[in-house]
Image (cartoon, rainbow, N blue to C red):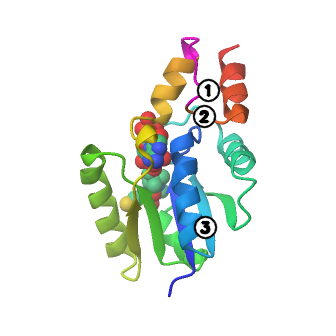
């Protein structure tokens, strides 16, 4: 039995959809590490420190969840964390191709690694960090999509 899992992402910023996946993973594993990537294919709006700070604040109620930032390859970081299970969220079929490639790549890099996919609650299937940022930048309401800490951080970015 694998007891620890890692949930990686850019989390720029963490949304209610991400939190939903973390809560589901936290029920399945003894310990979940939310791994915030310093670099991904995106150029984040929030610094790594801020993304880690926001995710830590949002997930503070979950006793078996730790938030950590990481540089470099996810597969290497998973090895350092002594876990072979990567959790990813699948919102729609459109997520699948990219996720399938990443899972394959990570398994090629470290053969012991398995990626498992969880689906969020229906109301979160259409949320993405970039859409939330865009709505916030244009002054729209984002209360249904992010935790109040994140809303404040997005408002500060706008001001
Ligand atoms: N609810 C809401 N939104 C969700 C979601 C959910 N359950 N699951 C994904 N998303 C959204 C995110 O908000 C994000 O939206 P955006 O594109 O508008 O920002 C998008 O779906 C995907 O984001 P996320 O889940 O954070 O993943 P990512 O694609 O940003 O992360 C990494 C990719 C960080 C895991 C990957 O780049 C990585 O491993 N990097 C480290 C370097 C490495 O090892 N590279 C080789 C990889 S094989």
Check residue 139 for magenta coloring.
Answer: yes
Residue numbers of the magenta segment: 137-144
Left or right: 157, with 39 as reference point? right
The dot on residue 19 is none
The dot on residue 143 is 1
- Find the residue positioned furthest to the bottom: 1
Q: Residue at x 56, y 41 (%)?
A: 16
Left or right: 104, with 73 as reference point? left
Check residue 97 for magenta coloring.
Answer: no
Residue beneath disc 2: 146
Q: Which quadrant does the C terminus fall into?
A: top right
Q: Is residue 136 above or below residue 145?
A: above
Query: Is residue 142 something one can see in this rendering?
Result: yes
Left or right: 125, with 141 as reference point? left
Ligand 1 closer than 8 Å to label 2 CB? no
Q: Position of residue 20 (x, y in %)?
A: 54, 50
Residue at mark 3 to residue at mark 2: CA–CA distance: 20 Å
Q: SS of the residue at dot 2?
A: loop
Left or right: 112, with 64 as reference point? left
Q: Kindly check if marks 3 and 1 are in contact, taking CB atoms under 8 A apart as contact.
A: no
Disc number lying in front (3 or 1): 1
């Amino acid at each position: 039995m694998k007891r620890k899992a890692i949930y990686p992402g850019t989390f720029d910023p963490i949304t209610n959809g991400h939190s939903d996946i973390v809560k589901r993973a936290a029920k399945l594993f003894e310990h979940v590490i939310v791994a915030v990537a310093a670099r991904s294919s995106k150029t984040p709006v929030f610094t790594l420190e801020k993304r880690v700070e926001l995710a830590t604040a949002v997930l503070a109620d979950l006793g078996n969840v730790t938030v950590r930032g990481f540089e470099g390859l996810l597969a290497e970081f998973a090895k350092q964390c002594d876990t072979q299970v990567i959790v990813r969220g699948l919102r729609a079929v459109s997520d699948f191709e990219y996720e399938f490639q990443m899972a394959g790549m990570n398994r090629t890099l470290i053969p012991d690694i398995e990626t498992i996919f969880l689906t969020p609650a229906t109301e979160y299937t259409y949320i993405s960090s970039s859409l939330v940022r865009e709505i916030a930048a244009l002054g729209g309401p984002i209360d249904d999509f992010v935790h109040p800490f994140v809303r404040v951080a997005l408002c500060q970015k706008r001001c």
